[in-house]
Amino acid sequence: MTLSDLLQVASNEGPFASSSKFPYFAAGDVADSPGGATYVSAGNDAAALAKNILSLVSGNKALTKVSAPMNALLVPVGSKKGRGQMPMVGLVGPWMSRLIKGKTLFVPQWQATYA
């Protein structure tokens, strides 16, 4: 699904037509939002999407544009091992995975959102 930089559906035709009177938005797997299909990108999209919907509901026309978060991929294997790829660095070893993700495996962020 093609989106504007506001996460608003950009189609003006067919069953997915969006208008200024009845705009609708998309995020997650169905959307081609900036960034990779990661937990970090999804959180980035969700925050911007929530701001935009609340803004429209309250009558404010100023919407938040979405920008891609840092495109990094880290795959921890337990709390001490793993591999990843970081922008401007390339492939990284266990030390980077442990530093960024290995300590908590993002469990506190997940609990704050979903628990």
Image: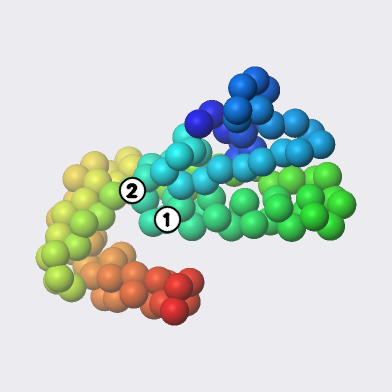
Residue placed under numbered mark 2 in the picture: 72
Residue 3, horizontal then vertical, whole percent: 57, 33
Residue 93, horizontal then vertical, whole percent: 15, 55
Is disc 2 in contact with disc 1, using a CB cutoff of under 8 Å?
A: yes
Q: Earlier in the sequence, mark 2 or mark 1?
A: 1
Label 1: state its secondary structure: helix
20 shown above or below 29: above
Q: CA distance from mark 2 to mark 1?
A: 9 Å
Q: Which residue is more in the foreground, 82 or 61?
A: 61
* Residue at figure coordinates x 41%, y 43% from the top left: 29
Q: Residue furthest right?
A: 59
Residue 65 placement, left or right of 1: right
Closer to viewer: mark 2 or mark 1:
1
Residue placed under numbered mark 1 in the picture: 40
Residue 12, horizontal then vertical, whole percent: 67, 22
Instruction: Identify residue type, mark 2.
Output: Ala
Quadrant housing the C terminus: bottom left
